Amino acid sequence: MVTAPFDSLSLRPDLVQTLLDLGFTGPTPVQAQSIPVLLTGRDLIAQSQTGSGKTAAFSLPILEKLDLERREVQGLVLCPTRELCAQVAREIRKLGRRMPGLQVLV
């Protein structure tokens, strides 16, 4: 079940459960600071070291806001290389694996 470290992020229980299943014990600093801002619909620029959780920091709010009944583009992530694009897509698919109908395209 959902545990306290992620409760403050206001994410859907299925997303929180996926995080727990993936072994996350709580949000990283960039996630804790970014996710609440992004969930309000505000723009954000964040800079953080490699491996600090930036992909989840922007992907989780996107996944939270999706309406899977609407069959149209609802999120767009721009990456400087195809390799990074494929990496980000894999991570989004992994985070959204409990969301039937989710399509992530590169």
Image (spheres, rainbow, N blue to C red):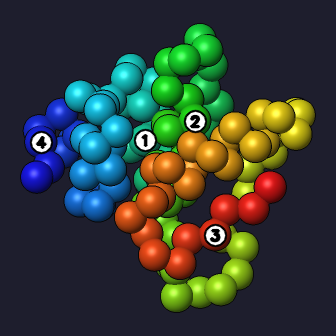
User: Quarter holding the C terminus?
Assistant: bottom right
- Per the image, label 3 sits on a secondary structure element best described as loop
Question: Which amino acid is tagged 2?
Answer: Thr
Q: Nearer the viewer, mark 3 or mark 2?
A: 3
**Mark 2 or mark 1: which comes first in sequence?**
1
Residue placed furthest toward the top: 49
Residues at marks 3 and 4, CA–CA distance in whole angstroms: 28 Å
**On the rendered structure, is 88 left or right of 53?**
right
Q: Is residue 68 visible?
A: yes
Q: Residue at x 55, y 29 (%)?
A: 54
Does 98 appear above or below 44? below
Residues at marks 2 and 1, CA–CA distance in whole angstroms: 11 Å
Residues at marks 1 and 3, CA–CA distance in whole angstroms: 22 Å
- Per the image, label 2 sits on a secondary structure element best described as helix
Question: Which amino acid is tagged 1?
Answer: Ile
**On the rendered structure, is 3 left or right of 47?**
left
Q: Residue at x 12, y 42 (%)?
A: 3
Instruction: Provide the residue designation for mark 3.
Output: 103
Q: Are marks 3 and 2 in contact (CB under 8 Å)?
A: no
**Mark 3 or mark 4: which comes first in sequence?**
4
Instruction: Provide the residue designation for mark 1.
Output: 35
